[in-house]
Image: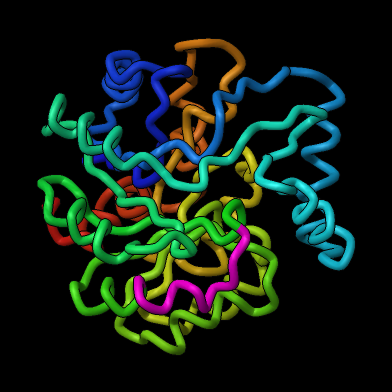
Amino acid sequence: MIVDCHFHIDETMLTLEKMIEGMDQNYVTKTALIAPMNETMFEVDSTFQYYVQNLFRSLILHVPPLGFPIYNGLVRDGFFNLYGQSYKIFAKPDNDLVAAAIRRYPERFLGWAAVNPTIPETVEELEYYLNQKGFIGVKAHPFMHQYSIRTLDPVAAMCEAKGIPMMIHLSSEKNSFKYLPEHYPKLKVIYAHAGLPFWRKLWKYAINQPNVYVDTSSDYLTPSIVQKAVEALGYRKVLYGCDGPYGMKQYNQYDYGEKRRWIDSLQIPEHQKEGILGKNFGELISIIQ
């Protein structure tokens, strides 16, 4: 069974029906959905964009003091700024979109309850969604919503008590990837995008943390970075995800197979690929056999 642990619902970009078509073509059984974080965003396929992406990745990996300021500059005053365009960030994620998708296709979709802990009554609202069928955990975005990892204390305590995972897109706050595992040792934490922006530093830390995982989602990554993450962490700590529909070039046309090929191309045994593609995540959320 193949399970995509990280995909955003945004039918202004990709309809659920088209998503399911792509899932079927690539043998993906289920996808865990997240509310959109920002306005509709199509990328331009250009040589300029290609070189900017490569420079960004290289600086993050090899020269973090230069890479982190570039990373931080992507978010400013409530907007996500990419390749000369600005997209409004949604301060309050619309989890109703995820709930509605699960009701329409309960056999195909799971749901993350997205949270912005700076908004009042956060825990109460999360309880509402987590009691609905198909919701499997909480997604937090300290990077786009611009808060310290410590702000997640009440949410982390709730998730630890419930035994459900948290998925987190980290900011560049110093050593923020250590905070939750050290204060909530039984909390299952998934760091999105292979632990961006810390990558190697996070991998070195996570290898000895039994409840810390990374996913393979996003155009922030490349096949090479995914391979490095698997080599550093071992296959059991790596989870397949796409981060679609972001990265699309045009409406309703998403290459669901690209991120799948990143895993297929790894030079590891088939049972390890199967772990990354779904078994690891299934065991983590305890509802998929």
- Examine the image and state in which quarter residue 44 appears: top right
Residue 288: x percent and y percent? 14, 51
Residue 73: x percent and y percent? 80, 50
Most foreground residue, 164 or 74: 74
Residue 189 visible in the current orientation: yes
Residue 184: x percent and y percent? 37, 85
The answer to whether 234 is drawn above or below residue 280 in the figure is below
Magenta stretch, main secondary structure, is helix
**Point 33% across, 58% down: residue:** 138
**Point 50% across, 40% down: residue:** 37
> Left or right of 259: which side holds 286?
left
Q: How many marks?
A: 0
Q: How is the image coloured?
A: rainbow
> Left or right of 197: which side holds 115?
left
**Point 72% across, 48% down: residue:** 77
* Residue found farthest to the front: 120
> Left or right of 212: which side holds 165?
left
Residue 165: x percent and y percent? 30, 65
Q: Is residue 154 magenta?
A: yes
The answer to whether 242 is drawn above or below residue 144 in the figure is above
The answer to whether 155 is drawn above or below residue 253 in the figure is below
User: What are the residue bounds of the magenta stretch?
Assistant: 146-155
Q: Is residue 228 magenta?
A: no
- Examine the image and state in which quarter residue 68 appears: bottom right
**On-image quarter of the N terminus:** top left
**Point 55% across, 63% down: residue:** 231
Most foreground residue, 265 or 168: 168
Residue 235 visible in the current orientation: no
